[in-house]
Image: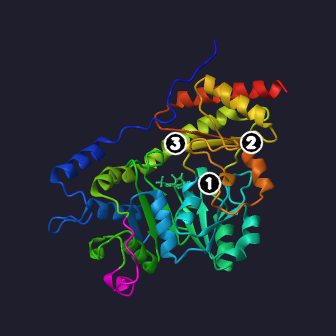
Amino acid sequence: MVERFTGSFTQQEPLPEEAIEAAVAVMRHGRLHRYNTAPGEVSEVALLEQEFAAMLGARYCLAVASGGYAIATALRALGVKAGDRVLTNAFTLAPVPGAIASLGAVPVLVGVTPQLTIDLEDLAAKADQAEVLLLSHMRGHLADMDALMALCDARGIAVIEDCAHTMGAAWHGKASGTQGKVGCFSCQTYKHINAGEGGLLITDDAEVAARAVLLSGSYMLYDRHAAAPGSEVFEGLRYETPNISGRMDNLRAAVLRPQVQRLPDQVARWNERYRKIEAGLRETPGLTLIDRPAKESIVGSSFQFLLEGWSADQLREVVAHCANRGVELKWFGAPEPVGFTSRYDHWHYAPVQKMPASDAVLAGLLDMRVPLTFSLEDCALVARIIRAEVTAVYQAT
Ligand SMILES: *Cc1c(COP(=O)(O)O)cnc(C)c1O
């Protein structure tokens, strides 16, 4: 009998009851806007910011409308202007170069290694081209952050971390998002906490935090923030910082707060599933797993592997055969953007750059989501199907 998988790769878990109750309470009192508070009340958004900052050990936190908005705000808060060049990953999702383009700034793409992290040699070679690196921990893979920060510190490059896939992860025991000057997170449904849409920005830099609060549209009500610097920091900035509205509301914050508290448990559940799939794919002929360094604490919310040196037709065959058996793989080598898998050469607003080493990695890269609605048995089945189909195509050639 041919085994088929019938689960959904896009189905997340329901929100915890506590989150649902908190949302209903906000709807009952009606004060959904973050600055609409009763006397003495601290808003859900301000509490979320405080709790998220405490969890990561960051000094300041700002909740906003989306992860992409958090990134664009971080770039603005660091003083990036139209025409400036910003270093960023060639392997990432479109909202990352998109945030740079939204300022009229210009992405300078840095290559990807077969470990799926930013190529530090390529970064060193391009370091004199920009003063900011927007570093995307794409698909949760952390580069050697000690080496990366040493390189960027030595070259005077400020680092913004895109932690859309690393909320809850760490490098060498230090939370992802706290290594660079600013860390940006997404609370969109497919990330690690789910508000539909939403973003979080953390920093230890008082001036960057104050600028971010003003940029997000604080209407000079910044004293209602519980995780922002004192009003003296805002004094010099309040007249020169434009209001580019992108606040989070109390309804979203209410559903996120209980999810922040249970994040460590969810991370453990993701990693059990990740390791199950990894174990099921070990020593599949022709298939390369991505080694996870000992210093990296992962969040296995998605899974990647390489079919190195395989032809485009073979890759297409594997994807099609797995799809027939209910396993949805995304291929980063496709000539046209499909769903979330666009490739750097699809971003025509970025100057064309030739990156043959990155092209070779992406040509063999397959990816899948691992939602927590999958049981461990589901994960073992998914791995068995991939293993069988990869082996079949491999042996046919
Ligand atoms: C989702 C995502 C973002 C942006 O988050 P949104 O909340 O969707 O704007 C940024 N970077 C990566 C790698 C992402 O996956």
Residue 266 location (% of width, % of height):
45, 45
Question: What mark, if any, has residue 92 been given in the picture?
Answer: 1
Dominant secondary structure of the magenta stretch?
A: loop
Query: On the rendered structure, is 144 left or right of 55?
Result: right
Residue type of the residue flagged with mark 3: Trp
Give the quadrant of residue 308. Answer: top right
The answer to whether residue 127 shows anywhere in this view is yes
The C terminus sits in image quarter: top right
Examine the rendered structure and indicate whether residue 33 appears above or below residue 331. below
Query: On the rendered structure, is 236 left or right of 113?
Result: left
The answer to whether residue 54 shows anywhere in this view is no
User: Of label 2 and label 1, which has the lower sequence position?
Assistant: 1
Q: Residue furthest top?
A: 1
Tell me where the magenta segment starts and ends, as one range: 230-245
Mark 2 = which residue? 364
Residue at horizontal 71 percent and vertical 30 percent from the top: 318
**Label 2 – label 3 distance at C-alpha:** 24 Å
Question: What mark, if any, has residue 182 been given in the picture?
Answer: none
Asked if the stretch drawn in magenta spans residue 236, the answer is yes
Q: Nearer the viewer, residue 222 or 277?
A: 222
Asked if the stretch drawn in magenta spans residue 385, the answer is no
Examine the rendered structure and indicate whether residue 13 appears above or below residue 100. above
Q: Residue furthest front?
A: 348
Residue type of the residue flagged with mark 1: Thr
Mark 1, ligand 1, within 8 Å: the answer is yes
Q: Secondary structure at mark 1?
A: loop
Mark 3 = which residue? 270
User: Of label 2 and label 3, which has the lower sequence position?
Assistant: 3
Residue 36 location (% of width, % of height):
21, 64
